[in-house]
Image (cartoon, rainbow, N blue to C red):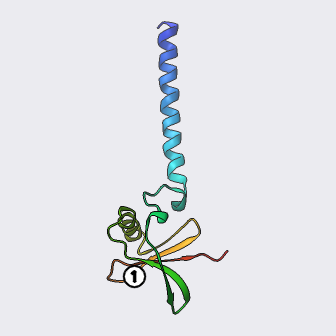
Amino acid sequence: MSSVEFLVELRDAAQMMADAANEYLERLKPPEAKEYDWNPDKIKWTQAEGSKGPYQRSDDVNSPDFKALLKDLETHNGKLTRNGFFYWKFNKSAVVGRKKRKV
């Protein structure tokens, strides 16, 4: 085996190790650290008052971001927290509420 062939095989082996390490690290991230495909700033929110105080709500069904948020909520049993906001889906409707989390 020539030194060039050896270096190519060594490089390929190192790349496979790096790829495996990256995949493993990706699985170790907490769910909140993973990327999501909706932007709450692109969703129309309105102020509302509930039994537990003020919150924002949306039924912006024409927004792709709202639709992606609904799907994300469905995978998290209707409740999730992102960037300091608690989001929830109202039962049997396409309405989402959000409220700033207390620190």
Q: Count of labels shown?
A: 1
Give the side of residue 73 with respect to residue 29, left or right.
left
Reply above or below: 24 against 47. above
Reply above or below: 23 against 84. above
Residue at 52%, 93% (x, y): give it: 51
Seen from the viewer's position, the closer of residues 30 and 36 is 36
Residue at 37%, 63% (x, y): give it: 68
Reply above or below: 98 against 7. below
Seen from the viewer's position, the closer of residues 96 and 44 is 44
Residue linked to disc 1: 90
List the single residue furthest toward the right: 103
Q: Quadrant of residue 73?
A: bottom left
Tell me the kind of residue under disc 1: Phe
Give the side of residue 90 with respect to residue 56, left or right.
left
Crowd tier of the residue under label 1, counting other residues whose Cα lies within 10 Å: few below 14, some 14–19, many 20 or above: few
| Image location (x, y in percent) of residue 90 | 39, 82
Indicate the quadrant containing the C terminus: top left, top right, bottom left or bottom right: bottom right
| Image location (x, y in percent) of residue 23 | 48, 44
Give the side of residue 39 with respect to residue 64, left or right.
right
List the single residue furthest toward the top: 2
User: Of helix, strand and loop, which one carries label 1?
Assistant: loop
Seen from the viewer's position, the closer of residues 16 and 62 is 62
Residue at 48%, 55% (x, y): give it: 35
| Image location (x, y in percent) of residue 54 | 55, 85
